Image: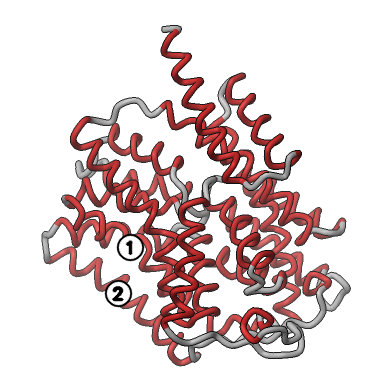
Amino acid sequence: MAEAFYGGMDLRSEPTAARPGVRAALEVLLVATRLGVTSFGGPIAHLGYFRDEYVRRRKWLDEATYADLIALCQLLPGPASSELGIAIGILRARLLGGFAAWLGFTLPSAIVLTAFAFVVEALGSGDLSWLHGLQVVAVVVVANAVWSMGKTLTPDRPRLLVALGGAVLATGLPPGWGQVAAILLGAVAGVVFFRGGAHEAQDQGERAHVEVPIGRVAGAVVLVAFGVLLVGLSLLRLVISYRPLEVFQSFFVVASFVFGGGHVVLPLLQSAVVPTGWVSNSQFLAGYGAAQAVPGPLFTFGAYLGYIAAGGVFGAAVGLVGIFAPSFFLVIGTLPFWDALRRRTGFRSVLTGVNASVVGLLAAALYNPVWTSTVHGPSDFVLVLVGFAIVFVLRAPPWVAVLILGALGAAFHGLSLLHL
């Protein structure tokens, strides 16, 4: 990371520092926007996209720092990939960089889903089968992420066993609980098996110091403010009947307590907007299909629901801010304590185990919901094979698979209509 900041300093011997100024934030915005336009495949796949862009291509972070940030964001409720982007943006260009990273990664899909909400309200939910090719891309992208992250985070048998155990828990237990159990398994395994051993710190030696441009006092104040807002919004809703406030509070609470990322939040959102009559079940399912087909974070589904539930573009903005606001509070509040903790021997052992369990979570997500929700028949399996050939055999970028599988999926849908 310091190499990117200061033009060639040793990553392990020199401290890193965020780059101040609007220019650095604009750089983050441009990179994040490109990711927001091309990052298909859902929250797990985003980890692979981020690694390729921020670690391998631009070298804004080293592998150890990136892995530790993933572990931190997995421990926090909310959308892990978006929180990871915010954290990277803060480390690169301070608080303005964090906002720029979120805005660039989020806005493209939020705009598309807001426009789709307008179409759904105007024309009805319709048939979204033609989007299925884009959904199948998730299988290929997530498999690529599992392979790439696995090589880095589980290079030996003990960590591979932790990953497999995490995958079993994440698959066998209910959504949300499985992820928490897998993370706890990794943490315990780190303390018991990896403490002070050769496995520590992913075999990369002493962690490079990362200068976090937020003071610990400020971080603590932000965490207190988060708790006050969480309680205050719920109390305010009891005395004020105003639909945008109700939507904001519902989305804020859901995002504050959901573990497991985008797919886990969907049933919680459904229970918040469908029984209340804000959104019909057919509208919800239509938006669910569209949210899986667009790039960027799945939490932008909040913009779609906000448009329908709270009225137009303003409602979309309310839903979008409400569902992402907890991520900013949690990342800004915990990041000042992260660098000191990750360089402590005991905590580094915990991170070693947690990072291994993250690979298990990736593998579990590859099966459910990615595979189970997208591969339903021979034509879907053909699309998966084509995608694997493009990414794993031809070594083409994932966006090439997005274009080809999207076109093939639409073609298969058209042929199926002809045979009706």
Q: Quadrant of the N terminus?
A: bottom right
The reply to whether the C-beta atoms of the residues labelled 2 and 1 are less than 8 Å apart is yes
Horizontal relation, residue 71 to residue 133: left or right: right
Residue 352: % across, % down: 74, 69
| Residue 368 seen | no
| Residue 251 seen | yes
Camera-side residue of 62 and 339: 62
Q: Quadrant of the C terminus?
A: top left
Height in image: 28 above or below 300? below
Camera-side residue of 278 and 386: 386
Residue found at x 81% / y 53%: 161
Residue 125: % across, % down: 28, 31
Residue under label 2, please give it: 229
Q: Amino acid at mark 1?
A: Phe
Q: Amino acid at mark 2?
A: Leu
Residue found at x 51% / y 51%: 38
Residue found at x 35% / y 48%: 269
Horizontal relation, residue 10 to residue 79: left or right: right
Residue under label 1, please give it: 252
